[in-house]
Image (cartoon, rainbow, N blue to C red):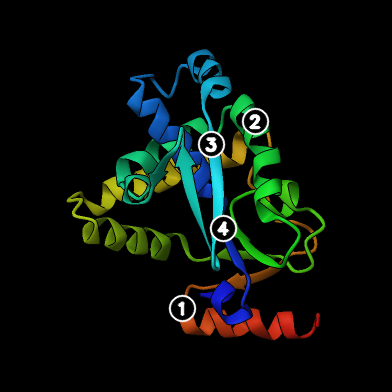
Amino acid sequence: MLSARLGCLYLDTGALYRAIAWKVKLEGISPGDREAVSRLLPVTRLEVERRGDQMTVLVDGKELREELRTPEIGKLASVISAIPAVREWLLPLQRHAAGSGHMVAEGRDIGTRVFPQADVKFFIEADPEIRVARRHRELAAAGVNQSVDQTREEVRIRDERDCTRDVAPLVKAEDAHVIDTSTLDEQEVLDRMLAVIATKL
């Protein structure tokens, strides 16, 4: 992992959206009910604790780990992340979680909205069919049995939702370094990132 190689904090901002999705599910609220989701925010205590180079998320005092990694929560998070009130509510928490030290942050609006002044930004992309294949393997490893066509449709829907949402849509930051991972493995992607970072030190 890049953060481990650099010896800094890893901030997965997507985990914060998944934490809200978990609370929405817990309360039995439809993720499509924007007003109900918005009313839930002021009565939710979301905390991020730093433990070494990793972050731990707590909702109302409950530490969440595997609960945030299920495909169901991932789908719910994709829906509620398009709600402007949720993005506005989480923004200061995301920035506060970073603290004052060095960090690696991951998310679809990290370089454009959350940390627009970041020293180094990467925009990771891949051929659509390769992305579908990778996602299908992830779901299979998590015990989710579904067709490739269904996975392809889910990826398409999420991309469309992220690119067309009203607040902080998914776009490439102008100063981001683009890495096409279609033919690269994880180590090769990491090496390319480190090479770029080295030029900034």
Cβ atoms at labels 1 and 2 below 8 Å apart:
no
List the residue tagged with mark 1.
186
Distance of mark 4 from mark 1, alpha carbons? 25 Å
Distance of mark 1 from mark 2, alpha carbons? 33 Å
Residue 169 located left or right of residue 155: right
**Label 1 vs 2, first from the N-terminus:** 2
The image's mark for residue 50 is: 4
Q: Disc 1 vs disc 2: which is toward the camera?
A: 2
The image's mark for residue 46 is: 3
Cβ atoms at labels 2 and 3 below 8 Å apart:
no
Where disc 4 sits, the SS reads strand
Where disc 2 sits, the SS reads helix
List the residue tagged with mark 2.
89
Disc 1 residue crowd, few under 14, some 14–19, many 20+, Cα 10 Å: few
**Vertical arrangement, residue 10 with respect to residue 41, above or below:** below
**Label 1 vs 3, first from the N-terminus:** 3
Distance of mark 2 from mark 3, alpha carbons? 11 Å
x then y, percent, for residue 146: 20, 49
* Type of the residue with mark 4: Arg
x then y, percent, for residue 133: 33, 63
Residue found at x 48% / y 73%: 182
Residue found at x 40% / y 61%: 129
Cβ atoms at labels 4 and 1 below 8 Å apart:
no
* Type of the residue with mark 3: Leu
Distance of mark 3 from mark 4, alpha carbons? 14 Å
Q: Disc 2 vs disc 3: which is toward the camera?
A: 3
Q: Please identify the quarter of the rendering in which residue 92 is found.
A: top right
